[in-house]
Amino acid sequence: MAKIIIERDKCKGCLLCVSVCPKGLIIVDKDLNQKGVNPVKFSPLVSRIPSKARQVNDECLGCSLCAIMCPDCCIEVYK
Amino acid sequence: MEKIFSRPKSLRNISTHYCPGCGHGIAHRLIAGVVDELGIRDKVIAIAPVGCAVLAYDYWDFDCTEAAHGRALAVATAIKRVRPQNIVFTYQGDGDLAAIGTNETIHAANRGENLTVIFINNAVYGMTGGQMAPTTLLGQKTATSPLGRNAQREGYPLKISEVLSQLSGVKYIERTSFYSPQEILKAKRAIKLAFQNQIEGIGFSLVEILSPCPTYWDMSPQKAMEWIANIMIKEFPLGRIK
Ligand SMILES: Cc1ncc(C[n+]2csc(CCOP(=O)(O)OP(=O)(O)O)c2C)c(N)n1
Ligand code: SF4
């Protein structure tokens, strides 16, 4: 069991975290944040990326790859 | 559940002015993390550059000062000589370290000053509008090389880390990058070593980081990372140089 918490109002929407999550658990939020950009949101269990939809286990691994990649330090990881 | 990844204490909890996907934010976090891990927060003094990272002193929660464009290593030399008990590092872009500041850089390195240098190579002048830098790749389009850098006209990308590695005063140089989480962790290890070298009195240590500037490369943040991985590292090979 693991999870991430994204500070939505600090997110600039660069989507680098989306590109590295091995489970495809980070998706774009269609609601704007305070900065006026579409931030990302954590969407565990249901993978929304078609190529990754076949993953059997869509739980967060707590691998921290998203947090390591985030240029704005918006992601905390819990395991 | 336990928190396994969070903001380093030495990094203030405020939003930076950097563009989305800019590598400066990653570099700031890595340095803050290393400062925390080495327990040197009350001893460290940063010299912020002129360039997009000019406001770095607003983001790090430790002592910082500012130098005129390119002069960071001259200022660092003075501070380290007056206060040898402090851990002094410069944070410089390629325009700062390898263009206007080449003189200060080469002589500080050649004197073997016991300093740590974090060198952010994004192959352009970011702050002033994406002009060509000495590190711009051949063929790369910038505001001042709109048809792509041409060797006949503008010379070749300057490999300043390789140049510096020839100097006897230099003890450690490594080139790293930010194109993947694995590479970011390698960059962090190199930064830590460069600080440890100073603590142990080993001498001049520099970490070059190939860092994305999506805005002036005219790419999405993800494409910029791919460009580093596929194109930039061919001109600037990664690994330990000295
Ligand atoms: C003495 C002086 N000359 C020129 C400038 C204009 N100037 C400001 S930032 C910059 C280049 C910055 O490029 P780089 O060091 O690569 O950092 P980046 O912005 O790409 O992070 C220049 C030429 C200045 N501020 N001071
Ligand atoms: S212009 Fe380039 S270097 Fe400057 S903040 Fe934007 S992405 Fe970063």
Image (tube, grey):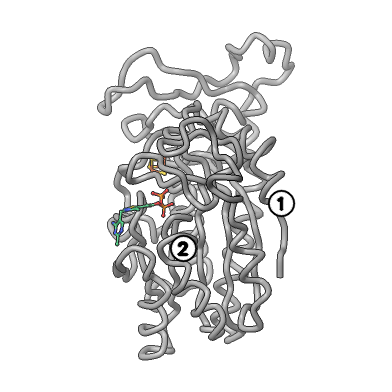
The yes-or-no answer for disc 2 within 8 Å of ligand 1 is yes
| Residue under numbered circle 1 | B237
Q: Residue drawn at (44%, 74%), measured in percent from left and top?
A: B104
| Numbered disc total | 2
Q: Which quadrant of the view contains residue A57? A: top right
Quadrant for the N terminus of chain A in the image: top right
Work out whether disc 1 and disc 2 sit on a shared chain.
Answer: yes
Q: Position of residue B198 (x, y in %)?
A: 55, 80
Q: Residue drawn at (72%, 57%), measured in percent from left and top?
A: B239
| Residue under numbered circle 2 | B97
Can you name the residue that lies furthest to the left here? A34
Q: Which quadrant of the view contains residue B43? A: bottom left
Q: Amino acid at mark 1?
A: Pro
Quadrant for the C terminus of chain A in the image: top right
Q: Quadrant of ligand 1?
A: bottom left
Is B116 situated above or below B86? above
Q: Is residue A78 left or right of residue B90?
A: right
Answer whether labels 1 and 2 touch (C-beta < 8 Å).
no
Q: Amino acid at mark 2?
A: Leu
> Considering only order in the chain, which callout, 2 or 1, is on the residue closer to the N terminus?
2
Q: Chain of mark 1?
A: B
Q: Chain of mark 2?
A: B
Q: Which quadrant of the view contains residue B175? A: bottom right
